[in-house]
Amino acid sequence: MLLQSIKLTQFKNYSATQLQFGERTILFTGNNGAGKTNLLDAIYMLSLGKSRYIPRDSKLIIHGEDFFRIEGKYQHLSATDLVVIKYPKGGKKEILLNAKKRERISDHVGAIPLVMIGPRDIQLFFEGSADRRKFIDAGICQYDKAYLHHLITYNRLLLQRNSYLKSIKSTGLNEALLSSYDQQLLEPAEFIKKVREQFIQDFSLLFMEAYKSISGDREAVSCDYRSQLLTYDFATALIEARQKDMILQRTTVGIHKDDIIFKMNGQVLKQFGSEGQMKSFLISLKLAMKEKIKAETGKTPILLIDDIFAKLDADRVRNLLTYIHHYDDTQIFITDTDADRVSSILKDSSITHEVYYIDENSPRLIHENNSNR
C-alpha cells in the first residue's frame, strides 16, 4: 500500500492541509509540539478508523470548529482507493471507502493495513499483560475477520459476566444465569486461543529474523505465548474459580489473562535490557507484525515510526532503515526532531526520501528525492 496524498480539514491543529507523497520514505521534522505526530495520527485513523491517542472523536476537531475531515488516496498494485473519514460535532462519524459507507469500524479494519511504532509502545515491556494482548489483537484483527468477531463477542460476554458478578451481592446468585455466561464464553475463547497460539509460532520466526538484522546479531531474543487455556479446560476452570470470582466480583480465568513473555539472552527483557536494546526489540516486534500481515493479506502495511530514534546508536538506525527499504515495498513515515539524524543516514544508504519541516502547523517540503545517487 502507498499513500499518495492526504488532506486534513479542521483535524487537531491542522485547519486545512494537503500533502502529496512521491517517495516510499517520508520524514516529518520540526520542534516538539509542531504537529508531527498529529500527521501520523491522521494516517493511522484512515486505516484503523480511530485515533491512536484520543478516544473521543469530538476532541479531534480543531478548537472553535464543528467538524473534521480526513481524506487519503492510496495505491495498491494497479488499483486506487480513496478513504474519507468525517465527523460532525454531536453527530456520528462516517468512514467511506471509495464512496461506500462502512457501517461499523470493524468493517473497515484491514482494508488499509498499517503498523505504528511510538514512544509509548515501550510500555509493552513494563505494563500489565493487557498492552501485550492488544499488540497481538491489533495485528490479527487486520487480516482475520473471524478472530475480530470472536474477540468482540468474548469481550462483550466478559463485561456482562463481570457486571452480573457485581450484582450478586444485592440480588443473590442465579446459578443458571452464571452458567449460561460460562457456556457462551467457551466457543470464542477456544477460537481466540488457537489463533493466538498459531500466530506466535509464525510470528516468532519473523521477529527473530528482524531483530538479527537490526541489532547486527548481537543478542538472542524470543517471545513466548502464555495462556491459562493451554493447560486447563476453560469450562472446568470457570467452575473452579466461581467462588473466587464472586468474592472479587470479576472473572479471574480466561483468555483475557493471556500474556507474551519477552526474553533476551534467556532472561526477561524488562529486568536487564538497556533502552537501546528495548527499542530494537520493540521495532523488531512491529516489523514482524508488518510481515505477518503482509503474508496473510498480500498487502504491504504502511509503517509509521514516531520519534523513537533517540537512544538508538547510528548502526541500529541504519540497519533498521536499510532493512525496511530494501526488504520490500513498504512506505515509511518517520517523525524526528533532529532533521539530520535520519536524513543523513538515509543519504549515506542511498535511500531516496522526502523531508517535510513542520513549522507553526504548516508542513513544508524542504528536500525532495534526497539521496546521494
Image (cartoon, rainbow, N blue to C red):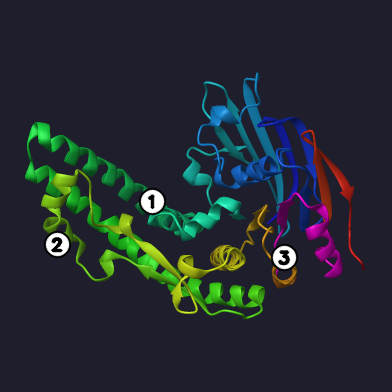
Residue 331 drawn in magenta = yes
Direction from residue 373 to residue 311 in the image, left or right: left
Per the rendered image, the range of residues in magenta is 328-352
Looking at the rendered structure, the kind of residue marked 1 is: His
Is there a contact, CB below 8 Å, between mark 1 and mark 2?
A: no
Q: Nearer the viewer, residue 49 or 314?
A: 314
- What residue does disc 1 label? 149
The residue lying toward the viewer, choosing from 339 and 67, is 339
Quadrant holding the C terminus: bottom right
Image quadrant where residue 126 sits: bottom left
In-image side of 135 versus 243 (left or right): right
Residue corresponding to mark 3: 329
Residue 162 in sight from this viewpoint? yes
Residue where numbered disc 2 is placed? 236
Identity of the residue drawn at 70% across and 42% down: 39
Q: Residue 60 location in percent, x, y?
A: 60, 31
